[in-house]
Image (spheres, rainbow, N blue to C red):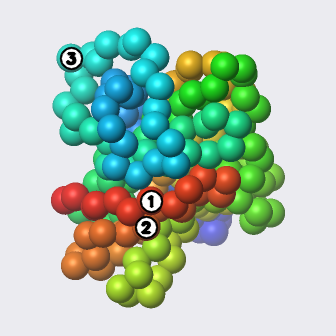
Amino acid sequence: MSIRFTTKARRGMAVLTVAAGLTLGVVGCGGGGGDDKKPEISASASKGDGSNPSAQEGQADEPLAELRGSSGLLLQITSAQRDAGGFVIVNATLKNDGAKSVVVPAALSGNETEIVRNGRSLGGATLVDSKGKKRYYVLRDTDGRPLTTTGFSTIKAGENLSVFMQFPAPPADATEVTFQLPTFASGTIQISG
């Protein structure tokens, strides 16, 4: 009986963790407003989509990094926040900067069987601490689901999708890490908090 109770309690905590992560991702991603600014890191310049920033966009005027992917996809990292629980939450905007709808590559989910089984996600993302010589993978809940935005497959031309990824936090002195996502260029980002 105690094993069953423990299992149910763990599942409940996993659901709460995922819900909290999703809430933080939605609240932390204010949108893709600074598209007309110069990118810090980019394979080519971004085209503005004419959208106006909302009043709730309290993030920096420019993204921490702007990474180009395949088929006109653009990832603008808006924040990388360290929290007291020992995690880093990366918020970003995934944008289709091309002229046609794009099917999001399955490679973004990574190649781990457990993550691939849970559908499309950004589970293939990693943070690399070059000084500490460590790579940090997207966290998973107790059922193997990645703690990241999931359930997307196609992005229409000009459409933005607010996304998040949760990682274990590197040591406190590691404030600069390299963000990597399959099919996208790598970029250096600053962790705040």
Rendered view: 128 above or below 156: below
Tell me the distance, in whole angstroms, between the alpha carbons under discs 1 and 3.
28 Å
Pointer 2 or 3: first along the chain? 3
Name the element at disc 1.
strand
Rendered view: 113 above or below 95: below
- Amino acid of disc 2: Thr
Rendered view: 29 above or below 82: above
Picture coordinates of residue 12, whole percent (x, y)? 52, 49
Tell me the distance, in whole angstroms, between the alpha carbons under discs 1 and 2.
5 Å
Categorize mark 2 by other alpha carbons within 10 Å: few (<14), some (14-19), many (20+). Answer: some
Instruction: Say which quadrant the C terminus sits in.
Output: bottom left
Q: Is residue 25 left or right of residue 171?
A: right
Q: How many marks?
A: 3
Instruction: Say which quadrant the N terminus sits in.
Output: bottom right
Label 2 close to label 3 by CB (< 8 Å): no
- Amino acid of disc 3: Ala
Label 2 vs label 3, nearer the camera? 2
Residue for badge 1 = 187
Pointer 1 or 2: first along the chain? 2
Name the element at disc 2.
strand
Label 1 close to label 2 by CB (< 8 Å): yes
Q: Residue at x 65, y 57 (%)?
A: 182
Q: Residue at x 30, y 69 (%)?
A: 176
Tell me the distance, in whole angstroms, between the alpha carbons under discs 2 and 3.
30 Å
Residue for badge 2 = 178
Residue for badge 3 = 55
Q: Quadrant of residue 158?
A: top right
